[in-house]
Image (spheres, helix red, strand yellow):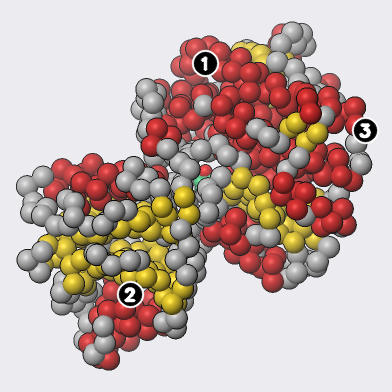
């Protein structure tokens, strides 16, 4: 949700900032802007509505000379996407320029007070309020920029990651964070700043992740200095990044989403590596081993997450209840945080988040910790906020996911939840050894089975043509296939803008059945499992109303295949392992329908990959 890039060094800053903005475009793309600290003592700001490429066009004939600067790609919160509301924002006298990710909740009160002091505003944003406040304090207290930033941030309520530059000090950036991510990249005589490490990975592997309440002073020729809001010096903790540049490129695919769908055999292999050993008979997650006593004594598990991660959480409930016999509740993190949750030290809260930065999930983690629960994180981004805030956890290790619609992260999350349930089952002895071995062996085969399922690509591309102009879709599944139906519907909505609803198949007759006619296709997820017979009657109910059916079934299926208009066959798996397999054709179906409609699948309208605001 908004991306920040900054640079101080000896190289041409414009190219570095623009490249960085492209890497962060997944975080928001309704407008972009850049502030260049010109050595002649002027800050040049260029902004443009729309994507970063619009900004590049706009900058073509501009003065781009500078060795330091800050830049921003926006996902609007306060004020519509427009040139005016785009960041960076100047302070009234043009001395300071600031970019911001997050929301300042008390901005109106501060704005009113500043207006009373004679300040005028050019935009509707909360960000401009912050830069004006910093300037106001700087002048009023006759202090330096760092002290003014510290003072201003003490008055602010809300989430922020900010970067500020000053006309009189062109080689310095002051940056701060509270609940929104910021990383500093330390190179040779150059320092980078960004919302995540992707903009600087090709220049340096040394990164420092700022913590809440910390302020970084990035100055040319000086080592990085970090202080707190109280001006106490903090330790500069350098992490060595493992990411590679090829992971951030499309590698011959038309879109990141397609690349990420096709990467799944590899990402699932990476996710399993070292965790399923002894020929499948030993399933070990180090996070579970570290928290063995907690899992042995847990009276309840609550899983919190948002979006696609919430669908993975629902599968986690089936997996943990079936395999470990521990009651599980699943909550939207945004609801959980305001629901007066009742938790104690025998509860385990699992927070699932691809980015590790989702504001609602992070807030839920903090509440759960405060209430004494043991908090376990499942995330993809190493060093992100949620893994840092949780007691222990597991990374899904699927590599950077750039496409806004989550694909490989979903299957990675489901895989980790599967391993987690089996790991707990092993220590709690809630499953016979033979059953664990059987599932472990099947898990080892999943990457090659996914590879086989991806061969459906051409068939799905052809099939997608028939449904490109459908206005509504219904996705139905039962048991383990119900969350898969929800995720399939979400994928279609996100990237094709077709209305789609996921439903537990049997519940369909209590409402959605009224919508079914020849115009409304239903996607039925019906692998051979203990509810297969039940779903057959749901398929009959759809057929009886003239609805067309796309069925995901197992190879050799004889009943539903005969009833469906289109059949996509996937290999049969043990029931609790089917979701990873059945979700792949649904990802491809959404992708091709969106492509047929000419939509931007990697950057769908109004969405952002990482939602760091409430
Ligand atoms: C956004 C993304 C979704 C994602 C959700 C939760 O809405 O567009 O793809 O599922 O946030 O993100 P998280 O990083 O917490 O999994």
| Residue 341 image-quadrant placement | bottom right
Residue for badge 2: 130
Secondary structure under the numbered disc 3 in the rendered image: loop
**Counting residues from the N terminus, which is met first, the one under dot 3 or under dot 1?**
3
Quick one: quadrant of the N terminus? bottom left
Q: Tags 2 and 1 in contact by the CB under 8 Å rule?
A: no
Q: Is residue 296 left or right of residue 400?
A: right
The answer to whether the residue bearing label 2 lies less than 8 angstroms from the nearest atom of ligand 1 is no
Sooner in the amino-acid sequence: mark 3 or mark 2: 2
Q: Position of residue 185 (x, y in %)?
A: 37, 55
Residue at point 75%, 31% (across, down): 277
| Label 1 packing within 10 angstroms: few (<14), some (14-19), many (20+) | some
Q: Does residue 391 appear to the left or right of 519 in the view shown?
A: right
Coordinates of residue 512 in the picture (x, y in percent): 67, 35
Tell me if mark 2 has few (under 14), some (14-19) or many (20+) residues whose alpha carbon lies within 10 angstroms of its own.
many
Residue 319's image quarter? top right
Quadrant in the rendering for residue 94 = bottom left
> Which mark lies nearer to you, 3 or 1?
3
Query: Which residue is disc 1 drawn over?
Result: 457
Measure the C-alpha gap from mark 3 to mark 2. 60 Å
Comparing 144 with 482, the one in front is: 144
Mark 3, residue position = 432
Residue under the point 58% across and 59% down: 388
């Amino acid at each position: 949700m908004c991306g920040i890039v900054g640079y101080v060094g000896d190289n041409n800053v414009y190219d570095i900032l623009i490249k960085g903005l492209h890497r962060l475009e997944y975080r928001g793309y309704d407008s972009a802007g850049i502030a260049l600290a010109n050595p002649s003592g002027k800050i040049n700001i260029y902004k443009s509505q729309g994507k970063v490429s619009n900004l590049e066009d706009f900058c073509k004939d501009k003065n781009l000379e500078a060795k330091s600067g800050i830049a921003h790609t926006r996902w609007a919160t306060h004020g519509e996407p427009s040139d005016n509301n785009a960041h960076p924002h100047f302070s009234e006298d043009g001395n300071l320029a600031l970019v911001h990710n997050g929301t300042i909740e008390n901005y109106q009160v501060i704005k009113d007070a500043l207006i009373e002091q004679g300040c005028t505003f050019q935009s509707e944003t909360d960000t401009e309020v912050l830069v004006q406040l910093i300037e106001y304090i700087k002048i009023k207290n006759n202090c330096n920029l760092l002290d003014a930033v510290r003072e201003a941030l003490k008055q602010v309520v809300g989430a922020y990651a900010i970067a500020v530059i000053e006309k009189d000090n062109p080689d310095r950036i002051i940056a701060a964070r509270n609940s929104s991510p910021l990383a500093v990249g330390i190179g040779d005589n150059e320092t980078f700043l960004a919302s995540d490490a992707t903009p600087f990975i090709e220049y340096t592997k040394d990164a420092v992740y700022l913590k809440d309440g910390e302020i970084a002073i990035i100055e040319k020729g000086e080592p990085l200095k970090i202080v707190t809001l109280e001006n106490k010096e903090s330790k500069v903790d350098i992490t060595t990044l493992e990411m590679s540049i090829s992971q951030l490129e499309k590698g011959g695919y038309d879109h990141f989403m397609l690349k990420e769908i096709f990467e799944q055999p590899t990402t699932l292999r990476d996710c399993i590596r070292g965790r399923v050993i002894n020929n499948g008979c030993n399933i070990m997650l180090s996070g579970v081993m570290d928290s063995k006593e907690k899992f042995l004594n847990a009276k309840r598990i609550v899983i919190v997450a948002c979006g696609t991660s919430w669908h993975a959480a629902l599968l986690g409930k089936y997996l943990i209840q079936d395999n470990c016999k521990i009651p599980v509740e699943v909550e939207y993190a945004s609801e959980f945080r305001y629901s007066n949750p009742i938790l104690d030290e025998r509860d385990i809260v699992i927070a699932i988040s691809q980015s590790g930065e989702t504001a609602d999930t992070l807030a839920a983690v903090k509440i759960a910790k405060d209430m004494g629960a043991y908090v376990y994180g499942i995330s993809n981004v190493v060093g992100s906020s949620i893994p840092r805030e949780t007691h222990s956890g597991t990374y899904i290790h699927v590599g950077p996911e750039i496409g806004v619609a989550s694909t490989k992260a979903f299957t990675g999350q489901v895989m980790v939840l599967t391993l987690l349930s089996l790991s707990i089952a092993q220590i709690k002895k809630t499953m016979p050894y033979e059953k664990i071995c059987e599932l472990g062996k099947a898990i080892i085969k999943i990457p090659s089975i996914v590879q086989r399922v991806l061969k459906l690509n051409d068939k799905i591309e052809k099939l997608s043509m028939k449904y490109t102009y459908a206005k509504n879709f219904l996705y139905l599944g039962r048991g383990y296939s119900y969350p898969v139906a929800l995720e399939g519907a979400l994928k279609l909505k996100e990237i094709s803008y077709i209305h789609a609803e996921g439903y537990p198949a049997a519940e369909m007759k209590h409402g959605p059945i009224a919508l079914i006619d020849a115009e409304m296709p239903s996607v039925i997820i019906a692998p051979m499992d203990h509810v297969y017979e039940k779903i057959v009657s749901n398929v009959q109910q759809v057929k009886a109303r003239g609805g067309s059916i796309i069925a995901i079934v197992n190879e050799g299926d004889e009943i539903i295949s005969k009833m469906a208009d289109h059949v996509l066959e996937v290999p049969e798996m043990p029931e609790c392992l089917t979701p990873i397999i059945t979700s792949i054709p649904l990802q491809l179906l959404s992708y091709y329908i969106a492509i047929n409609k000419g939509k931007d699948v990697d950057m769908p309208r109004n969405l952002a990959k990482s939602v760091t605001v409430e």
